[in-house]
Amino acid sequence: MKANLPKSTLRNDCRNTCWLAAAAALFSLSSAASAQPFYRLESAVVLKGAAPDWDYVTLDPVRSYLYIGRRGDGVMVYDVAAKKEVMTIENSKGAGSIKLVPELDRGYTANEDGSTTMFKLSTLKTLKRVQFGKDSDAVFYEPLTRQLVFTMGDSHALGFVDAGTGKVVGQLAMDSHKLDASAPDGQGNLFVAERDKDRVAKVDVKRRKVAAEWNIDGCSQPTGLAFDSTNQRIFIGCRGDKPVLAVMDSGTGKVVTTLPIGRGNDGVVFNAQSRQIYASNGVDANLVIYAQVDANSYALIEADTTRPYARTMALDPKSGKVYTVTAEGAADPAKKINTAVSAFYPNTYFDDTFTVLTYSRK
């Protein structure tokens, strides 16, 4: 005969069972992590040339091409299989960011003068350079509207360009001059990190309106950002005095947890296949990886050393390889130092030191 237990007892039993299940999942992940090989340096290829400058890197895993935004030098195309430079995209000077849209056979750059260089992925041939504003930091793509969205921090705005035609379709004023990484939700919206406001903005791309803005509790200077569409979670790399990876509910804007990472974060990637989140941190020179246990629970998988100022990255979801770049440099006291990142952040880089780093689990 089944006993009639008090509801409070049943609730307590449920809590205990749920806690034990979560603990078992975390223990299983921890055991798996200790058994797996860690990320280690597979290759470090030094490319000859004048003092380098760079920002974002983007991978085309089909063609094994890594696109590197070299700013003044334009976009470098690097073959990760052959481990050599292929070419520089024509008429792409000033590019710091690249977005690839394979379904349109197109690539697009974000150039510092507020223009984009459109090129064909299949041939790497430049099609045209389109002016959409006065400045630009990075470019992102919203697939439902097929629009490119450009962050323009100096202009306090987002720029919108039709990805198929290259036609400029509008701008949206933003209450931020430090607009960092963004990610689409697959439903017509784009989440944008507002570094100077410690917020995330939800932008309705079709209507070109801010649908919501959320403060990120426990986060200062949000930079890297990625999105998990299955669990509706935004992963935000925060590079303030207490660097953390903040996990936000994309429906409510509530931060469900924060997790420690390294200083100088500039890249966050979510691998939907492995359910793992990668954070590349240039000042501490590390790569921190968390596993998603469930929507609100995360376990540290590994934290690996990289090289100083390897801050942006690209992940091949199939091979699991991580690509990043760096160079040797110095903080010259005769020039302005970006103390917002670190007290001795390099403002001078040396010739013939630009290096493409490949990390793999050996």
Image (cartoon, rainbow, N blue to C red):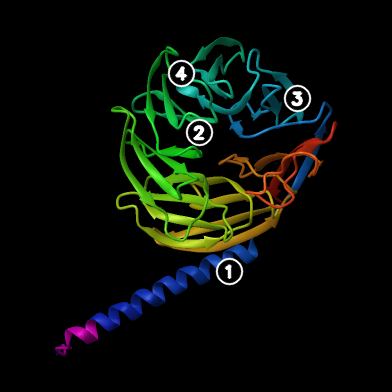
Q: Are marks 3 and 4 in contact (CB under 8 Å)?
A: no
Q: Farthest front residue? A: 334
Start and end of the magenta stretch?
Answer: 2-10
Dot 4 corresponds to which residue? 104
Give, as a three-letter code, the residue at label 3: Glu
Residue at the spot of label 2: 153
- For marks 3 and 2, the one nearer the N-term is 3
Q: Is residue 252 above or below residue 316?
A: below
Element carrying mark 2: loop
Pointer 4 local density, CA inside 10 Å: few below 14, some 14–19, many at least 20: few
- Which numbered circle lies on residue 85? 3
How dense is the environment of label 3, judged by Cα within 10 Å: few (below 14), some, or many (20 and up)? some
Name the residue tied to disc 1.
31
| Label annotation for residue 219 | none
Position above or below: 26 against 62: below
Residue 198: image location, x then y, percent = 46, 50
At 72% across and 31% down in the image, what residue appears? Answer: 53
In front: 241, or 265? 241
Numbered disc 1: secondary structure: helix
Q: Is residue 37 visible in the rendered structure shown here?
A: no
> Would you say 22 lies left or right of 121 here?
left
